[in-house]
Amino acid sequence: MDSKKSVGVKTFWYTDMLVMPKLVTIVTTINGDGIVNAAPYSLGTPYNVVQKKPQMLLGMRKASHSCKNVIETKEFVINLPSWELMDEVMTTAQAFPKGENELLHTNLTSIPSMKVKPPSIKECSQHIECRLENIIELEAGMAFVIGNIVDIVVDEGLIALGRNERIRAIDPPIYLGDEKRKYFYFGNVGETRMIELKQPSKVKNSRALTKMPWDEEALQVIAKLPAGIVEMVIELVEDEAQKNGLNEISYDFYKGIEEQYAPKDVQERFD
C-alpha cells in the first residue's frame, strides 16, 4: 500500500487534489422583475430530512445572480439533470450578464413550477421547489442558503420504478472536480450494487438507557430497535419531550415522534 503524504489545504481544496463526488444541479431563480436566472450548483445537500420541515442547503457565492435573486424573491428550484444534459448544464455556467436568461442559450425548456414562481426545467426529471428559510454568511464571499422544501416533483414515469430501475432511468451525473477552474470533470453512474444493511441484536434493557420515565408500552416499542440506535432514539425523544414541557414519555408521544422521523417502511424493518 502507498505511503500517505500531506498535500495541504488551499482554496477550492474540495475540487483540486481530492476526488469528492458531488451532486450536479441547475438552480433556477427569478429577480424582482421576473427575469429567470439558471446556474449549476454542486454544493447542495439535504439539510433537514424529516417530513415536518424538510430543507435543502446550498453553498453559493453571495455576489452571484442566483444568491441575489434568492435574497430578493425568496424562492428557488433545484433541478436535477441527467447525464445527457451535461453540455446544457455547462452552458448555464457561462458568465452571462446580469438579467440574461441562461436557459435561452440552451436547448432547455422553462415550465411552470407547482408551488413557487421560479420555473422548473422540463428536461430534468426531478425538481425540489424551495422557499428561503435563512442565509448564513460565510467568509470569502460565500453563504449557506437554507430553503424549506415546499414540493418535490418528478416525472410521472419514475414513480412506479424500483430504486435500481429509477437510478438507471435518471442517469444522474456526478461532479468530480476540475483543473485550474477551467477543465471540469464529470462522471455518471455505471454499475450499481445493492447491499442489505444488517442489524445487530436488540437491547436487553432499554430502561437502563432512559433519563426520563417512559410508560411500559413505549418501552416495549423501543426494545425492538437494534442496539446501535436505541440510545440515539431515546435521546431524540426525550429532547423533544423536554421542549414540549413533558415529564414522562407516553406511547402516543413516542409514536408521534416516530411518524415524523421514520417512514413506515423503515419502521417495519424493526417489527
Image (spheres, helix red, strand yellow):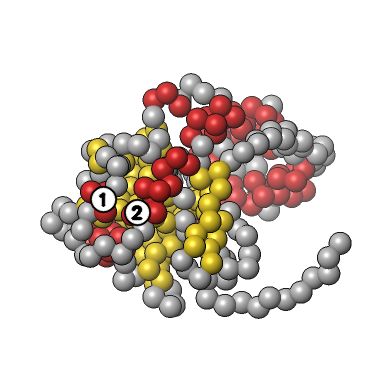
Rendered residue at 69%/35% (across/down): 193
Under mark 2, the amino acid is: Thr
Q: Is residue 251 left or right of residue 128?
A: right
Q: Foreground residue, 62 or 25?
A: 25
x then y, percent, for residue 6:
72, 76
Quadrant where the N terminus sits is: bottom right
Q: Which dot marks residue 91?
A: 2
Residue 74 left/right relative to 14: left
Q: Secondary structure at mark 1?
A: helix
User: Any mark on residue 105, and which?
Assistant: 1
Left or right of 142, for residue 70? left
Circles 1 and 2 in contact, beta carbons < 8 Å: yes
Q: Examine the rendered structure and indicate whether residue 30 appears above or below residue 82.
A: below
Q: Is residue 244 visible?
A: no
Image x and y of residue 35, in percent: 17, 54
Quick check: 250 above or below 247? above
Q: Is residue 262 visible?
A: yes
Q: Secondary structure at mark 2?
A: helix
Q: Residue furthest left?
A: 33
Direction from residue 110 to residue 17 in the image, left or right? right
